[in-house]
Amino acid sequence: MTGKERILAKLRGEATDSLPLMPITMMFAADLAGVRYIDYARDHRVLADAQVAVADYFGFDHVSAISDPAREASDLGAAVEWFDNQPPAIVESRALLDEKSKLAGLRLPDLAAPGRMRDRIEAVRLLAERTGATRVVEGWVEGPCAMGADLRGLNTLMLDFFDDGPFVEALFDFTVRMEVEFARAQVEAGATLIGVGDAAASLIGPKLYTQHVLTSEQRLIAAIHALGVPVRLHICGNTKRIVEGMGLTGAEIIDLDFPTPLGHARRAMRETQVLLGNIDPVRALRDGTPESVEAALAECFEQAGAAYICGAGCEVPRGTPYANLEAMARFARSRR
Amino acid sequence: MPDLDKLHQAVIEGDWKAAAAATQAAIAAGVAPLTIVTGCLVPAMDEVGRLFECEEYFVPEMLLSARAMKASMAIVRPLLAAAGTEPVGRVVIGTVKGDLHDIGKNLVASMLEGGGFEVIDLGADVAPERFIEAATTRNANLVALSALLTVTMPSMKTTVDAFQSAGLREKVKIMVGGAPVTQQYADAIGADGYSESAGGAVALARRLAVV
C-alpha cells in the first residue's frame, strides 16, 4: 500500500498492511533539510522541500503544510514577531481585537492575494504535485478557539467566555467562516486531508467546551467534509475532560497530546473512531531511546485498539535523535 | 468575620466586583490588611489551586479568581506597604527570551501573588539582563522562568548562567516551569527548583523562600 492508501483505508475502517504513520514535523523537518525556520514558514518551496525530505527519510505516510498558528492572523493584520530559527508568534499585548468592537469591521482575507495564507495554499499545491499520488497531503487551518485566541489574545478570550458569551459566539462564527474558505482553497490546491489545530480548547473545561467550542468545531468540520476530504483534529495539551466532546466533532482522526491516555479517549468514544498519537514528544520521543519509543508506542496501540495511527502527542521536537523517529517508523511498519 | 467569608467566596467564584466590595467592607470593619491576605486571600487561592489540580476548575475559572484576588490586593497592597509589612518573598517572573506564550506564567504569577508573595511580573520575551536588573533593584529572593517551547528552553540556561556571571547566583533561587520543561532539565541547567503545575509552583516557592 502507498501511504495515501494506508491512511485512507484506515479511515474507512478497512485492513491495512501496517499502521499509518503521521507524526507532525515542523522545526524537525526544517533542521533535517538544513534550512532556517523563518524560511520554512515564509516560503512554500522551502517547506515543501523539507516535508518531502523528512517523509522520504523516515517513510511517513503523509506530508503537511502546517508551520505555525500565525498565518491567518498575519493576513488579517495582527502583530506578529518573527524569529530567525523558530516559529513566528502573535504578539498578544497588541492583539488585533484588543477592543471587541473591532470584530464588526474585520473582513475575510483575500486568498488570491499574496500573503501567508496564499503561501500555505501554494505549499499544498506543490506537495500535491510532488508526492500527492502516494502520500496524503495535509492542509491545515486553525480551529475556532485557537483562532479566536490568536485574534483576541489568549488571556482575554479566557475571560470573555464568562464576561461576554455572545461576543465569543460572534468571534467563533467569523473564524469558522474564514477557515472554511481557507480549507476550500487548500482542497482545491490538492489537499487530501485537512488538519484542524485547536490548542486553546485544551485550556477550558467540558462545560465551556460544549457551550462554545464544540458546535463551532462541528460546523467547521462538517463544512470541510462537504469539500470532500477527511479531517484530523489536533488539540495540544490536557484534553482528558473534553475528549468525549472531541469524539462528537465528526473528525475522522482525533489526534491527542500525551496528557490524555488513549485508553481514556477510547472509553469516551466509539470503537471505530481513529485515534492518533500520543507519546510524550519531549520525555519519550526526544529524550528516550529507540527501545523506550517502541515500548511507549506499543502501549498507545494497546490502549487505542485497531483504529490507530502512529504519532507523537504533538510536534516532533527539534533535536529528536533520528534513531528514535526511525524506531517509531519501525514500530508502525511492523504492526497492522 | 462575615465579610471575609464573602471575600473568600468571591475569590473562589471569580467575582471581582464582590471581592473589591468585601475587601472595602472588611477594612471599614477594622480587619487588619495582613489578616485579609493571610486569613482569606491565601487560603482562597489555595482552594482555587486545588480545584484546578483536580480538574474542577480550568484556565478561565482560574483567571477569573485571579482577577478577583487582584481586585482585593489592589485595595490591600497600599495599606500593607504603608504599614511596612513584608511579603512572604519577592519573585521576579517572566517568560524567557524568545518565548511570547505567557498564559502559564500568568497563572503561576497569580497563584504566587495569591500565596502572599510580591510578584514582579516582567511579562513575555524577557532578556536575562532584565531579569537581573529587576531582581537587583527590587531585592527579589526568587526568580521564576517560564518557557512553552522546546526551542526557547535554552534561554533558561542562558538566564541562569547570566545570574552566575553577575555574581548573583547565591542571592536568588531560580525556579523553572513550562510544558516541555522537566526536573531533569532543571537539574541540568542548575536551577534550584521545577514545578509542573501552578499550585506546585507556590509550594516550591514557599520552600525555596525559606532556604
Image (spheres, coloured by chain):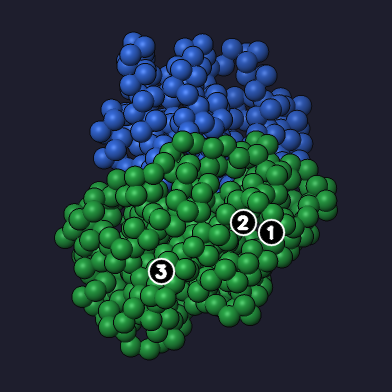
Chain colours: A green, B blue
Label 1 to label 3: alpha-carbon separation: 24 Å
- In the image, residue B203 sits, relative to residue A20, either above or below, namely above
Q: Residue, x 47% and y 21% (percent of image)?
A: B131
Label 2 to label 1: alpha-carbon separation: 7 Å
Kind of residue sitting beneath label 1: Ala
Residue, disc 3: A131
Do the residues at discs 1 and 3 belong to one chain? yes
- Front residue (pair A112, A215): A112
Q: Residue, x 37% and y 61% (percent of image)?
A: A52
Mark 2 residue crowding within 10 angstroms, few (<14) / some (14–19) / many (20+): many
Quick one: label 3 or label 2, which is nearer the N terminus? 2
Q: Residue, x 23% and y 53% (percent of image)?
A: A322
Most extreme residue toward the left is: A291
Kind of residue sitting beneath label 2: Arg
Given contact means CB atoms under 8 Å apart, are the residues at marks 2 and 1 in contact? yes
| Mark linked to residue A118 | 2
Report the side of A330 relative to B128 (left or right).
left
Residue, disc 1: A112
Kind of residue sitting beneath label 3: Thr
- Circle 1 — which element? loop
- Circle 3 — which element? helix
- Residue B184 drawn at (x, y percent): 26, 40
Query: In which quadrant of the rendered image does the N terminus of chain B lie?
Result: top right
Q: What's the chain of the residue with tag 2?
A: A
- Front residue (pair A11, A169): A11
